[in-house]
Image (cartoon, rainbow, N blue to C red):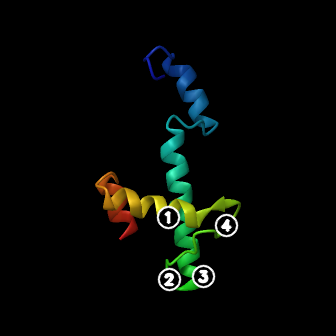
Amino acid sequence: KKNGKLDVSKQQLLEELSVSWDVHADQWHRKYRLLVQFYEREGHSNVPKEHVEDGENLGSWLRTQRTDKKNGKLDISKQQLLE
Protein backbone atom coordinates (compact mmCIF):
# COMPACT_ATOMS: atom_id res chain seq x y z
CA LYS A 1 0.00 0.00 0.00
CA LYS A 2 2.80 2.44 0.87
CA ASN A 3 4.20 2.32 -2.64
CA GLY A 4 0.74 2.21 -4.22
CA LYS A 5 1.32 -1.34 -5.45
CA LEU A 6 -1.36 -3.15 -3.48
CA ASP A 7 -4.39 -4.09 -5.52
CA VAL A 8 -7.49 -2.19 -4.35
CA SER A 9 -9.50 -5.39 -3.85
CA LYS A 10 -6.74 -6.88 -1.67
CA GLN A 11 -6.53 -3.64 0.28
CA GLN A 12 -10.28 -3.76 0.94
CA LEU A 13 -10.06 -7.37 2.12
CA LEU A 14 -7.29 -6.47 4.54
CA GLU A 15 -9.19 -3.45 5.81
CA GLU A 16 -12.20 -5.67 6.51
CA LEU A 17 -9.86 -7.54 8.87
CA SER A 18 -8.95 -4.24 10.56
CA VAL A 19 -5.40 -4.18 9.21
CA SER A 20 -3.73 -0.94 10.25
CA TRP A 21 -1.87 1.13 7.68
CA ASP A 22 -0.40 3.53 10.25
CA VAL A 23 0.72 1.54 13.28
CA HIS A 24 2.35 4.54 15.00
CA ALA A 25 -0.82 6.61 14.82
CA ASP A 26 -2.87 3.68 16.09
CA GLN A 27 -0.51 3.23 19.05
CA TRP A 28 -0.70 6.94 19.88
CA HIS A 29 -4.51 6.87 19.85
CA ARG A 30 -4.59 3.71 21.96
CA LYS A 31 -2.50 5.43 24.63
CA TYR A 32 -4.63 8.54 24.37
CA ARG A 33 -7.74 6.42 25.02
CA LEU A 34 -5.96 4.95 28.05
CA LEU A 35 -5.31 8.48 29.29
CA VAL A 36 -9.01 9.30 28.91
CA GLN A 37 -9.83 6.12 30.83
CA PHE A 38 -7.41 7.15 33.59
CA TYR A 39 -8.91 10.66 33.70
CA GLU A 40 -12.47 9.38 33.93
CA ARG A 41 -11.55 7.03 36.77
CA GLU A 42 -9.19 9.32 38.74
CA GLY A 43 -10.64 12.75 37.94
CA HIS A 44 -7.27 14.16 36.83
CA SER A 45 -4.54 13.53 34.27
CA ASN A 46 -1.51 13.80 36.56
CA VAL A 47 -0.33 10.30 35.72
CA PRO A 48 2.65 9.13 37.81
CA LYS A 49 5.67 8.57 35.56
CA GLU A 50 5.82 4.83 36.34
CA HIS A 51 2.06 4.21 36.07
CA VAL A 52 1.03 1.29 33.87
CA GLU A 53 -2.50 1.25 32.47
CA ASP A 54 -3.76 -1.89 30.74
CA GLY A 55 -0.20 -3.08 30.12
CA GLU A 56 1.04 0.26 28.72
CA ASN A 57 3.44 2.62 30.51
CA LEU A 58 1.03 5.54 30.41
CA GLY A 59 3.09 7.78 32.69
CA SER A 60 6.15 7.58 30.48
CA TRP A 61 4.07 8.15 27.35
CA LEU A 62 2.43 11.25 28.82
CA ARG A 63 5.80 12.62 29.91
CA THR A 64 7.03 12.21 26.32
CA GLN A 65 3.96 14.07 25.00
CA ARG A 66 4.58 16.96 27.41
CA THR A 67 8.26 17.10 26.44
CA ASP A 68 7.42 17.03 22.74
CA LYS A 69 4.94 19.88 23.22
CA LYS A 70 7.47 21.93 25.15
CA ASN A 71 10.02 21.41 22.36
CA GLY A 72 7.51 22.23 19.61
CA LYS A 73 7.51 18.65 18.30
CA LEU A 74 3.96 17.61 19.14
CA ASP A 75 1.51 17.77 16.25
CA ILE A 76 -1.15 20.44 16.79
CA SER A 77 -4.02 17.96 16.37
CA LYS A 78 -2.55 15.81 19.16
CA GLN A 79 -2.05 18.90 21.34
CA GLN A 80 -5.70 19.78 20.91
CA LEU A 81 -6.78 16.30 22.00
CA LEU A 82 -4.58 16.47 25.08
CA GLU A 83 -5.78 19.91 26.20
Quarter of the view holding residue 65: bottom left
- Nearest to N terminus: mark 4 or mark 3: 3
Say which amino acid is labelled 4.
Val
- Name the residue tied to disc 4: 52
Spot the residue most to the right: 55
Graded by Cα atoms within 10 Å as few (under 14), some (14 to 19) or many (20 or more), the crowding at tag 2 reads few
Cα–Cα span, label 1 and label 3? 17 Å
Spot the residue most to the bottom: 43
Q: In the picture shown, does residue 42 fall above or below 60?
A: below
Q: Nearer the viewer, residue 58 or 37?
A: 58
- Nearest to N terminus: mark 2 or mark 1: 2
Relative side of 53 to 65, left or right? right
At x 56%, y 38%, the residue is: 20
Cα–Cα span, label 3 and label 2? 8 Å
At x 40%, y 64%, the residue is: 66
Cα–Cα span, label 4 and label 3? 14 Å
